[in-house]
Image: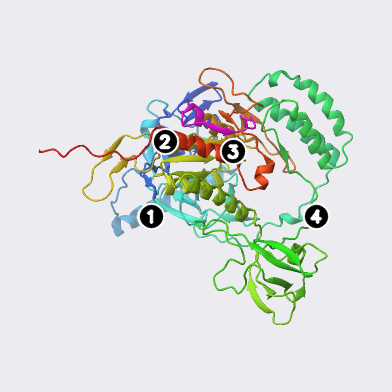
Amino acid sequence: SRYIAYAKNQENGNNAIAIYDVKEEKLRQVTSGFYSDLNPAFDPDGKYLYILTNRNFDPVYSDFDNSWIYPNATMVAAIPLSKDTASPLAPKNDEVTLKGEEKKEEDKKDSKDKKSDKKKGDDKDKEEPKEPKPVTISFDGFEERMIMLPVDAGNIGSLSAVSGKIIYHRFPHAGGSDKNQPLVYFDLEKREEKTMINNAKSYSVSADGKKIMVSASGSYTIVDVEPDQSLGKSMPVKQMEMTLVPREEWKQIFNDAWRFERDFFYDPNMHGVDWNLMRERYSKLIDDAVTRSDVSYVIGELIGEINASHTYRSGGDIPSSLKRSVGYLGIDWGLQNGAYYVKRIVKGAPWDADEHSSLHVSGLKIKEGNYILAVNNVPIDITKDPWAAFEGLSDKSIELTVNSSPSLTGAWKILVEPMQDETRLRNLEWIESKRKRVDEASGGKIGYVYVPSTGVGDGQYELVRMFYPQHNKAGLIIDERFNNGGQIPDRFVELLNRKPLAYFAVRDGQTWQWPPIANFGPKAMLINEWSGSGGDAFPDYFKKSGLGPLVGMRTWGGLIGISGAPTLIDGGNITVPTFRMFNVDGTWFREGHGVDPDIEVIDDPAQLAKGIDTQLEKAIEEVMKSLNNKPVGLPKPPAPEKR
């Protein structure tokens, strides 16, 4: 209990291991931080400090260009605490004892044990508890004693230790298909890794190091620290009950929310707001709260006083009613002759294989203009919306009664699987309509890339999958209207801002450009007032990089960002803005104002109703103007040399 080890943040972005001596009140950083070291755990026997360390550099190459990353970099290491302690992987003595000598040694030991037992019996009443053996740490050369244990590097976390074993969690490899999260240990004596549980969510070791509580599949089970454990009888946690006084809990929730902002908001001055006064003022409203939703409302008003973006509250112990899914067919419905019919089948984008209308399936006997008369033999009631007939039927095979006329005579039946949501399908149709318009208006010279966010899912997905097949266009239009943010998009701009470094002449085929996947032509970006957060940073970086004009309307203006906050006691959440962007010239990004367009084009609803996107048309005009002034293309190689 004298020492506390933890991972200490470094200026280079890595973590280093630090040890605090409670007795001497002294802090020592024991690893350099040259690599990122984390999750230290003391050996209960006082011999080693175990850590996780990111030191495995095994590149994974992209299938689309010549870039690469270094995932699954974590290794398990042990550091002898004392310079006099042998390495856990030190060579073992393989000498054997002959049977005769072994028998003599056993006889001597038995004789000694009998004498010892007799003496213990005499002094039984005089025995006293042993003092714990003091732990000695040699701080000089600490990191130099580090030993990498012979386990495969990977995505490893949650390290802890029991006597003779190091326990850790293996998470799925980045990019891998295996979703299991095995709980494993490394046996110091046998020097091998063993799996305890094939798939676990989390775990906790008992104080004596003999048992582990494992969380898996929504239940908790106690297992031994041994290989091949099964999740047998789970703990009866559903029988646990508590008495709750909601008003008292609501006061705690309010106070915690107030404290989170006080302690973690990026500006300790709270934007000049008297935060103590805000607590006094809004806490009075909690006394009048009747539901948890009322509490959420008050918290929302409280954190709104800071006047910063990314101040949200959500969740908590709020009652919810039973909901039923609704199936969708991915069509526009029409009503005529007393029946619903297929007015139009939404086609999405031909280059997208993930989203299809339920009726746009090969071999299905239905087309636009056909009537849909019944669902699972239940006639469709035309006094209700057509979706009412599909309640509770999403992602289930259903039977539709179809005819070319609004009559059951001559009708036929088809089996289809309704969609859970058709938003994505319709969004793809919108994207493809913009791409086709750009292609037609430019004679195929300009590409169109839509970027809906700067997040891990749709934003990073859409940018690269639309950029790669169009990187060889003479110019590009990047549409980030309605971009709802996500991560800081420096990588987005890096992709768009690749400069020509060289060209390679080849005997057959077209000259190579380098970098091979890049667009060196003129560009423009579409923005609007629905673009925010990462959707503010994206056009800001685009403009600073000189990639082209911004066309449209001023963005939302929210770049005081969030990086996580503790959870409230009832599972609710509030966000705490912990960082704010400022420019390289030392000025703040204009929070609440956003990024101004270079060319302002106000949305014209009348034109949109006619299918004319005035902002898109202006972007096409600007890129074509640049192309006409300075055509781009691959240069011709120099004349061949006589070498």
Q: Where's residue 87, x and y in %? A: 36, 39
- The residue pinned by badge 4 equals 321
x%, y% of residue 286?
Answer: 85, 33
Q: Residue at x 65, y 55 (%)?
A: 218
Tell which tag, 2 or 1, sits nearer the viewer: 2
Can residue 273 be seen here?
Answer: yes
Q: Main secondary structure of the magenta part?
A: loop
Q: Is residue 90 left or right of residue 466?
A: left
Indicate which disc residue 322 carries.
none
Name the residue type under label 4. Answer: Ser
Of mark 1 and mark 3, the one earlier in the sequence is: 1
Magenta residues?
542-559
Q: CA distance from mark 1 to mark 3?
A: 96 Å
Residue found at x 61% / y 31%? 561
Front-lying residue, 19 or 544: 544
Q: Which mark is residue 628?
A: 2
Report helix, strand or loop for mark 4.
loop
The residue that label 1 is drawn on is 107
Q: Amino acid at mark 3?
A: Gln
State the residue in front, 304 or 206.
304
Note whether residue 44 is visible: no
Q: Position of residue 514 (x, y in %)?
A: 32, 39
